[in-house]
């Protein structure tokens, strides 16, 4: 599937699309809803929490207030690295080189140096309580998949899109990236960063403030349930993607 595909856009519009303009208009982008730097930190904390990091937002912010001079423990450093990746993304255009650089930054605590910012060279699966839940595309086909993926991103960035289309394609990019699973680790963090990066690239820097990572964390069971569309890369049923795509605009409520 190509992420430029509008096959499910009509269904998307029926389920959530017509609400997006109103949700954007009603969303508080002002400093009253949190400053830019603070909300970037919140995004990194919640995204890390989804991956099992135990440091909540309150604990992280108190660490910054009282313990910043101490050498941070691994979980704190993991969040700091992800904040740095968001900071890089906010200052750079979305493309393959920039995303790989972000992965290099965010993965410093959990991948060896030779695997940071590089596509994996080994098979990767997603495992649940009962065993293998999903098997990603084989490493020998990654280069082709990612070439197509970023060609589609470039096309979408160059096209004029409505707000409804931006949210649709951003979530579809998130979903497809997670299914390709291009890295040895850090795919979820990179996918959520990519999604918001695309929205901000198309609609403006203020959209870095939307609480998508918080919404996914607070609805984590649904997040994982709806991202699961098949047992392997070749049996994905994107006709069932609507529930996942609707999560991004719902974070504006």
Image (tube, rainbow, N blue to C red):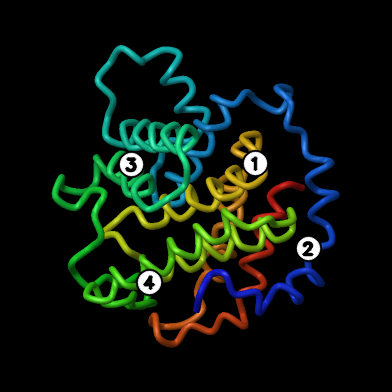
At 65% from the left and 38% from the top, the residue drawn is 204
Per the rendering, the mark at residue 120 is none
- Tell which of 56 and 164 is nearer to you: 164
Confirm or deny contact between disc 2 and disc 4 (CB under 8 A). Answer: no
| Mark 4 vs mark 1, CA separation in Å | 32 Å
Q: Earlier in the sequence, mark 4 or mark 3?
A: 3
| Mark 2 vs mark 4, CA separation in Å | 35 Å
Per the rendering, the mark at residue 129 is 4
Residue 104 percent coordinates (x, y):
27, 44
Confirm or deny contact between disc 2 and disc 3 (CB under 8 A). Answer: no
- Tell which of 150 and 172 is nearer to you: 150
- For mark 3, what is the residue? 106
Give the foreground label among 1 and 2: 2
User: At numbered mark 2, what does the secondary structure look like: helix, strand or loop?
Assistant: helix
Give the foreground label among 4 and 3: 3
- Mark 3 closeness class: few <14, some 14–19, many ≥20 residues within 10 Å: many
Position of residue 55 relative to residue 113, above or below, is above
Q: Earlier in the sequence, mark 2 or mark 4?
A: 2
| Image quadrant assignment for residue 35 | top right
| Image quadrant assignment for residue 53 | top left
- For mark 2, what is the residue? 17
- Mark 4 closeness class: few <14, some 14–19, many ≥20 residues within 10 Å: few
Residue 249 percent coordinates (x, y):
71, 54
| Mark 1 vs mark 2, CA separation in Å | 17 Å
Q: Is residue 131 left or right of residue 188?
A: left
User: At numbered mark 1, what does the secondary structure look like: helix, strand or loop?
Assistant: loop
At 58% from the left and 31% from the top, the residue drawn is 39
Q: Is residue 6 left or right of residue 82?
A: right
């Amino acid at each position: 599937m190509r992420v430029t595909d509008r096959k499910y856009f009509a269904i998307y519009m029926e389920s959530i699309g017509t609400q997006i303009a109103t949700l954007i208009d009603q969303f508080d982008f002002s400093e009253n809803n949190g400053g830019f730097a603070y909300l970037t930190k919140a995004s990194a904390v919640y995204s890390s929490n989804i991956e099992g990091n135990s440091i909540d937002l309150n604990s992280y912010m108190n660490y910054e207030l009282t313990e910043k001079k101490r050498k941070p423990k691994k979980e704190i450093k993991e969040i700091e690295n992800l904040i740095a990746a968001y900071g890089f993304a906010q200052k750079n255009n979305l493309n393959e080189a920039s995303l790989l650089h972000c992965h290099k930054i965010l993965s410093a605590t959990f991948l060896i140096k030779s695997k940071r910012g590089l596509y994996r060279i080994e098979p990767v699966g997603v495992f649940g309580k009962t065993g293998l839940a999903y098997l990603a595309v084989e490493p020998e086909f990654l280069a082709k998949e990612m070439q197509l993926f970023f060609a589609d991103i470039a096309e979408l960035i160059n096209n004029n899109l409505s707000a409804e289309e931006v949210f649709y394609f951003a979530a579809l990019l998130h979903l497809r990236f997670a299914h390709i699973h291009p890295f040895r680790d850090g795919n979820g963090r990179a996918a959520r960063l990519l999604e918001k990066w695309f929205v901000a690239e198309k609609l403006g820097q203020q959209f870095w403030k939307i609480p998508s990572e918080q919404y996914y964390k607070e609805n984590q069971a649904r997040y994982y349930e709806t991202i699961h569309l098949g047992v392997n890369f070749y049996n994905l049923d994107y006709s069932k993607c609507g529930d996942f795509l609707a999560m991004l605009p719902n974070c504006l409520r």
